Amino acid sequence: MAKILINDGIHPTGLKMLQDAGHDVNTTKIDQENLASELPAYHAICVRSATKVREDLIKVCPNLKVIGRGGVGLDNIDVTYARDNGVAVINTPAASSRSVAELVFSHAFSVSRSLYKANREMPSGGDSQFKALKKSYSAGVELKGKTIGIIGLGRIGCEVAKIALGIGMKVIGSDISGKNIEVDLEIAGISLSYTIENISMDELLAQSDYISLHVPSLDKPVLGADEFAKMKDGAVLLNASRGGTVDEDAMMTALQSGKLASAGIDVFVGEPSPRKDILNIPNISVTPHIGASTGEAQENIGIELANQLIDLLG
Ligand SMILES: NC(=O)c1ccc[n+]([C@@H]2O[C@H](COP(=O)([O-])OP(=O)(O)OC[C@H]3O[C@@H](n4cnc5c(N)ncnc54)[C@H](O)[C@@H]3O)[C@@H](O)[C@H]2O)c1
């Protein structure tokens, strides 16, 4: 039996798995300043992004065997120090892929039919007002038959590809790996396999009606002024990867000029305080980094963490 501290919460399914495996699990949050005195009694700690597990804390916890991160980013953990000192560091990178991909399509559908605006402008009464509004939304666009260019064909990029194929889009992709990627999907019980040809970024930008970014955090933006210039006029940008993967000045210019018809954005430079002009421009649908915010993703995260902890701790 190991003592496990769950400091930033876990889905009840994951908690039950750990308890059923016989572990002593504490889910009561210990404040950051008290961790150095209390964590030494534990064999494992699980965190999200709130709790920091830095070198000075790891140093005073000789019993610590595992640091678990529910989610992907490990910025709040001194990973190298932990691993160099025999402490395993685990995370759950695949648990939220489907949820993030579905959010991408929430934005894609929303901007294609101006739902984000129509929701707020729905008139409370008056035939002429209703008809005028209906007319102003007559330029909606179907996704079926359009081409989506996916930049970054990893876990989430592949989930986006599956949904896109399911709704009849043409899927193209570009990934620095240079490899073609095969995705398996099931539609109405029928299993299908589809190969996404890995084309150059320039080809992707020139051919895509919708462009969806699924790259990791990088030193410089993948999409800047040069890349926007190479896109089709009236393209739609979707970004649920990381703030900084798109040059926001260049994106704003493209939205203002009509080069981009619209954008659906879940991630921003300077989170949690995105720049005001992005929030206020009309042809954009924005969300506060909620890609993984579904019950299913949270349950998957709990299950994936619990499975790994049980493997490592017995
Ligand atoms: N919005 C959210 O809530 C949310 C949730 C989870 C993950 N994410 C983010 O989504 C992104 C993708 O996650 P993932 O799990 O699919 O990652 P992944 O590692 O599975 O895939 C990333 C892919 O990008 C490719 N790549 C890297 N640099 C590239 C470049 N310059 N050009 C083209 N391709 C490049 C890699 O080869 C890889 O195939 C990450 O930034 C992750 O942090 C966002």
Image (spheres, helix red, strand yellow):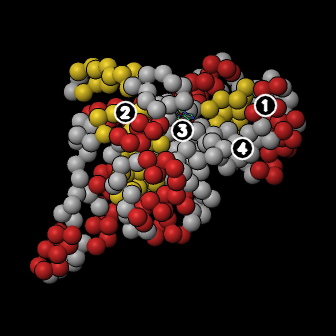
Q: Name the residue under label 3.
A: 215
Along the viewing direction, whichever of 174 and 232 lies nearer the viewer: 232
Q: In this view, does 201 lie above or below 190?
A: below
Residue 104 screen position, x and y as percent = 40, 46
* Residue 172 tag number: 2
Q: Residues within 10 Å of mark 2 (few under 14, many from 20)?
A: many
Mark 4 and mark 3 lie on one chain; the one further toward the N terminus is 4
Dot 4 and dot 3 residues touching (CB under 8 Å): no
Q: Report the Cα–Cα distance between label 2 and label 1.
A: 36 Å
Label 2: state its secondary structure: strand
Residue 11 at least partly seen: no
Mark 2 and mark 1 lie on one chain; the one further toward the N terminus is 1
Q: Which amino acid does label 1 sit on?
A: Thr
Q: What residue type is labelled 4?
A: Asn
Label 3: state its secondary structure: loop
Nearer mark to the viewer, of 2 and 3 = 2
The N terminus lies in quadrant: top right
Q: How crowded is mark 4: few (under 14 residues within 10 Å), some or many (20 or more)?
A: some
Q: Mark 1 points at which residue?
A: 80
Which picture quadrant has residue 203? top left
Q: How crowded is mark 3: few (under 14 residues within 10 Å), some or many (20 or more)?
A: many
Nearer mark to the viewer, of 3 and 1 = 3
* Residue 183 tag number: none
